[in-house]
Image (cartoon, grey):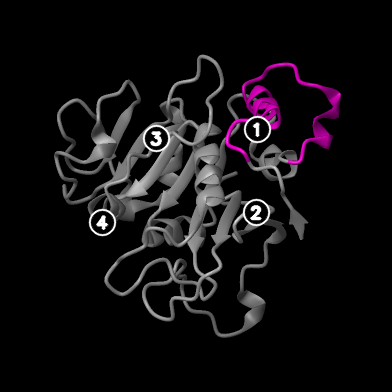
Amino acid sequence: MHTIVDWEPNTSQWSQVLAAAHGCVVSDRISDNALWPIYGPLIPKSGHQAVVIGQLGQSLDGRIATPSGHSHYINGAAALVHLHRLRALVDAVVVGVGTVVADNPQLTIRRASLAPGKTQPARVIIDPHGRIPPGARCLTDDGARRIVIGAKAPAGTERMDLPPEGDPAGILKALAERGLPRVLVEGGANTLSRFLAAGCLDRLHIMTGPIIIGSGPTGVTLPAIDTLDKALRPDVSTYALPGGDILFDCAFSKRSGS
């Protein structure tokens, strides 16, 4: 396990990562950057290469909320910085409408800096049945693209057809065709599980907080298997962050459609 000591939101190390992500010339010594092992693998080798990252925050016993749905905050400040850094590295952040209804997230970058000239990532909501509240904060018109995948979309947003059966690969293909090849699948558990089950993730970042909840929903639910040889076995690196959170960086060697 690697222990990350300096985790301030905006440091010269983070600036180096941003520069690399946006095609700027960076020092040959970037491998000495403590953040590079975490974020370097998320940076595509070419500007149009698709990269899909899943992110999940959970307790030590794998819970993402209490039975009543309360989840603020299972993970600490360092985990929130990490989430906002992930947003800063992608073109689009994808969530299911259940997350919007339950948590009313902004899906913006506030705890990390953006590269100069870079806009906030597009906010993409999967909403097959038109459940998104009109006043949802992720629909705020702040210059970022807002895309609703479903039968209808609120005024001022882009609408995208939902592929048959909500096919995750079809969603990613349609986003790439709209100039959004780098995607963060942020939640909720249902949406993330569908993308993972479909083999559509390159990386999965699981942030585990030092808390035991004991009941409530779990983060990942996949189709049942009979024997462990059918279990997913990603390559895993772990990082200890200030405050007690542990980041499990899960790398999948090949995803469907890649």
Q: Residue at x 76, y 60 (%)?
A: 1
- 23 or 209: nearer the viewer: 209
The image's mark for residue 241 is 2
The answer to whether the residues at label 3 and label 2 have Cβ atoms under 8 Å apart is no
Residue at the disc numbered 3 = 108
Q: Amino acid at mark 2?
A: Leu
Q: CA distance from mark 2 to mark 4?
A: 27 Å
Residue 60, quarter of picture: bottom right
Mark 3 against mark 2, which lies toward the viewer? 2
Q: Is residue 183 left or right of residue 148?
A: right
Is disc 4 surrounded by few (<14), some (14 to 19) or many (20+) residues within 10 Å? few
Q: Secondary structure at mark 1?
A: loop
Locate residue 241: give its quadrant.
bottom right
In the image, the segment drawn in magenta is 8-34
Q: Assess whether mark 4 and mark 2 are in contact (beta carbons under 8 angstroms).
A: no
Give the residue type that dot 4 points to.
Ala
Residue at horizontal 30 percent and vertical 34 percent from the top:
147
